[in-house]
Amino acid sequence: MTKPPLTLYLAAPRGFCAGVDRAIKIVEMALEKWGAPVYVRHEIVHNKFVVDGLRDKGAVFVEELEDCPDDRPVIFSAHGVPKSVPAEADRRNMIYVDATCPLVSKVHIEAQRHADAGLQMIMIGHKGHPETIGTMGQLPDGEVLLVETVEDVARVEVRDPERLAFVTQTTLSVDDTKDIVAALQARFPKIVGPHKEDICYATTNRQEAVKVVAPKSDALLVVGAPNSSNSRRLVEVASKAGCDYAQLVQRADSIDWRALEGISSVAITAGASAPEVLVNEVIDAFRDRYDVTVEVVETATENVEFKVPRVLREPA
Ligand code: 0CJ
Ligand code: F3S
């Protein structure tokens, strides 16, 4: 039987960012340095395949520091942690390595700097997401106000409208955030913040690439996990950019082939925490069913790299 033709637009950049690369390396190097088990507080990055692979090598994933013994090293995930977490690890004399992405740590430092200057902080982010919990947790409970939408901006109650600053989660939708920042600036003209927002280069670049491939594709698949904020945003961006069928897929076996019946083009991208092996697995699954022509659509090049913490670079 002859296979139907299919143009497969492969978005670039896609997949691992520098912060994810570093976080995974930190766990691998910690296992080499200290042996198993090494504890990891929260999924190091939001991807089951990555987490399962590290678990096989001896990493133990827990949600809270209280689930870790005192005498084994613990790593904090790429998303960042509230200040209380390293403080408690210090109190318990634990060895810990912070795998928080340096671009998230930069936001933490900004939040603290604004608070030290006497400004009340507003965070634009998703309630309950570990990065939001970590960034809000740089300041005492109740000090940071959270807004998730333009509607929230109209409702937020501040101490002094003249003395405010804002920070954002790094993985938000660039377009939605622009509207929220504009609403904040309209209501509080004196509010201080970053030049635009704190969305990172990787989030921005992956969304830009999706905006280019989505309008010319009958379907768009984002390789990524359901709890991955940046991956979910890529699905939303694709839908908004005019793609009729945009879906998150964890790997090839979660593709809904029925829903794809009759397509002649598909775009594929991957969230910042999704490994390229899973992208290749998805492409191979299309090759099994279609006569595929791959077209790489590159909208930016990336050359960001972050060093692992010194403790892991020193000889054992
Ligand atoms: O929060 C981050 C620093 C991004 C880490 C990489 O992506 P992921 O999927 O683990 O996390 P998000 O849910 O924040 O996108
Ligand atoms: Fe960092 Fe952005 Fe990746 S904040 S972990 S570079 S998605």
Image (cartoon, rainbow, N blue to C red):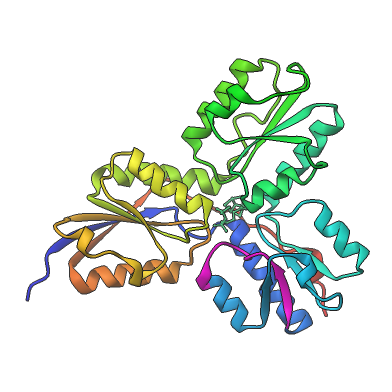
| Residue lying at 22% horizontally and 74% vertically, measured from the top left | 288
Tell me where residue 277 appears, x and y as whole percent.
43, 72
- The magenta span reads 37-49
Tell me where residue 10 appears, x and y as whole percent.
33, 57
Camera-nearest residue between 202 and 63: 63
Ligand 1 picture quarter:
bottom right
Indicate the quadrant containing the N terminus: top left, top right, bottom left or bottom right. Answer: bottom left
- The quarter holding residue 27 reads bottom right
- The quarter holding residue 87 reads bottom right
| Residue lying at 47% horizontally and 53% vertically, measured from the top left | 231
The magenta stretch spans residue 39: yes
- Most extreme residue toward the left is 1
Vertically, is 19 above or below 251?
above
Camera-nearest residue between 252 and 300: 252
Tell me where residue 196 appears, x and y as whole percent.
59, 30
- In the rendered structure, the answer to whether residue 121 lies left or right of residue 6 reads right
- In the rendered structure, the answer to whether residue 225 lies left or right of residue 242 reads right
Vertically, is 80 above or below 196?
below
- In the rendered structure, the answer to whether residue 12 lies left or right of residue 85 reads left
